[in-house]
DNA sequence: TTCAATTAAGTTGTAGGATGATATGCATCA
DNA sequence: TGATGCATATCATCCTACAACTTAATTGAA
């Protein structure tokens, strides 16, 4: 717990700020793919930091596959498709419509995964899923705990698919949503408690126990739409709302 | 083109190697969440590199949310759920079964996204998708070009959903698969050319033009299964094969 | 003895300079 | 002309030093 708070309240170090600046510069199109970055010395002068700080910032961007540095020449912006990682901008999620998009993605991932899990789950999977379910509706009704249990419930289902990539992706998306909601509540105390609908979870669990893929998928889909609505995000998106 | 070759043949810098070592150490469980890393000085001595190199390596891991450094105390391993990014280990994809899992994830993402795209696509989306389709079967039959066109085709469909997160995720997964296949062919020249089935793509496109979500989803599903089989990966996975 | 303040040591954060490796353009010379 | 060598620019790595922060030991007084 202490650890999590520390993680959220982490001080912004200089390399992080420089990396964030350059990152935004690239995302916004100020620096197009193929463009050459200023030299390390120029950047260090521009930001008023040491060259080491600039290098650490560039090391981060390079690890993301956002830029490529070549000895003797300079650093260049890479095309978005060449990114080595997926990273979601927490700022953008403050926009409800972006949050809705993320929920839509989550729905796609989890609905079909629930079907897979229903077909493949072993007994030990059902046990761990049940354990999370019990924590959710049981004694641990204090907010953080039940939200953690909710998340664990979804992660365990993803794990029951036996596909580690599915597990990774679903865990990631859920965590992004959780932290965004958490942050929104911190800054806007008026925000109601997020209520967890245990019934929806039970229906998913029952379908998994029955080994019924179609029922599991339908229950998961209904649950995510419900969860989105409970945090004030309207789903499903209109059929043409996405395209502009 | 030159740029891409450079990107693939990039030399392994010292920070990258140190980061890879620590990363594997964490993934393998040698360093559990909450554990404290050795001090920067210890690491620099252990690897025989300067402290700056160690710091750049740690900067990368920190940007990924894999570790958290706290001034005056040390650096600590974070729980996998707290990762700020998704990163796929290229090494692991050399295992055919892992590749199959990634194809399975791709199938989940793209099938339903194709349905969304069919419902939401605008005329300009159809145009860019058609352009990619033409490049695929047209003059650009030389390998790289048609593979690029194939990828573009899928990315444009993802874009037609109007959901940038879907676009990001699908682009990422497709790119990982592409680069892995590319690398496999480089190291194993015996490997046949990857043949692209234009017919499957045309069926997807037709469904998008018709605005028929069900047909688009079915065509996309069939296409990805076919594409997987063409690169030697058997899909679909058996219903219980994933769980162990 | 107990508790608060101070001190010391250890660790990460930042700064700045020095040297090596690599790429590019220019001048020199056969 | 063409090839070679040099100067320059840039990133890669190393080194030292100091600042900021945390922890624990030490000291001092009530």
Image (cartoon, coloured by chain):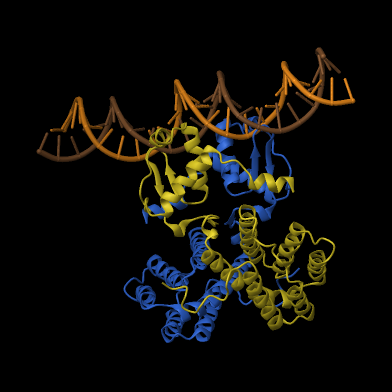
Chain colours: A blue, B yellow, C brown, D orange
Query: What number of labels is visible?
Result: 0
Can residue A146 be seen from the camera position used here? yes
Given the current orientation, which residue lies at the most extreme front position? B190
Q: Position of residue A93 (x, y in %)?
A: 59, 61
Q: Vertical placement of A19 versus B164: above or below? A: above
* Frontmost residue, A216 versus A223: A216
Which image quadrant: the C terminus of chain A? bottom right
Left or right of B178: which side holds A110? left
* Frontmost residue, A183 versus A201: A201
Can residue A6 be seen from the camera position used here? no
Q: Position of residue D3 (x, y in %)?
A: 79, 24
Q: Position of residue C5 (x, y in %)?
A: 27, 31
Q: Quadrant of residue A72?
A: top right
Q: Quadrant of residue B79?
A: bottom left
Q: Position of residue A104 (x, y in %)?
A: 60, 72
Left or right of A13: which side holds A138? left
Left or right of A23: which side holds B1? right
Which image quadrant: the N terminus of chain A? bottom left
């Amino acid at each position: 717990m202490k650890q999590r708070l520390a993680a959220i309240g982490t001080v912004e170090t200089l390399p992080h700020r420089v990396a964030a600046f350059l990152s935004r510069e690239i995302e916004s199109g100020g620096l197009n793919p193929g463009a050459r970055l200023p030299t390390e010395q120029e950047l260090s002068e521009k930001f008023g930091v040491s060259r080491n700080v600039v290098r650490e910032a560039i090391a981060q961007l390079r690890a993301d596959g956002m830029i490529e540095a070549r000895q003797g020449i300079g650093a260049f912006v890479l095309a978005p498709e060449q990114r080595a990682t997926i990273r979601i901008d927490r700022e953008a999620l403050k926009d409800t419509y972006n949050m809705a998009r993320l929920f839509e993605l989550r729905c796609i991932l989890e609905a079909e995964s629930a079907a897979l899990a229903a077909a493949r789950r072993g007994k030990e999977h059902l046990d761990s899923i049940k354990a999370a379910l019990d924590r959710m509706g049981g004694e641990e009704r204090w907010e953080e705990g039940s939200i953690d249990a909710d998340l664990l419930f979804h992660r365990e289902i993803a794990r029951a698919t036996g596909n580690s990539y599915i597990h990774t992706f679903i865990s990631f998306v859920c965590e992004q949503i959780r932290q965004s909601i958490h942050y929104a509540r911190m800054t806007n105390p008026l925000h109601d408690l997020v209520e967890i609908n245990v019934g929806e979870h039970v229906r998913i669990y029952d379908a998994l126990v029955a080994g019924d893929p179609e029922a599991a998928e339908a229950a998961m889909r209904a649950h995510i739409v419900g969860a989105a609505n409970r945090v004030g995000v309207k789903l499903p998106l209109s059929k043409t709302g996405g395209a502009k």
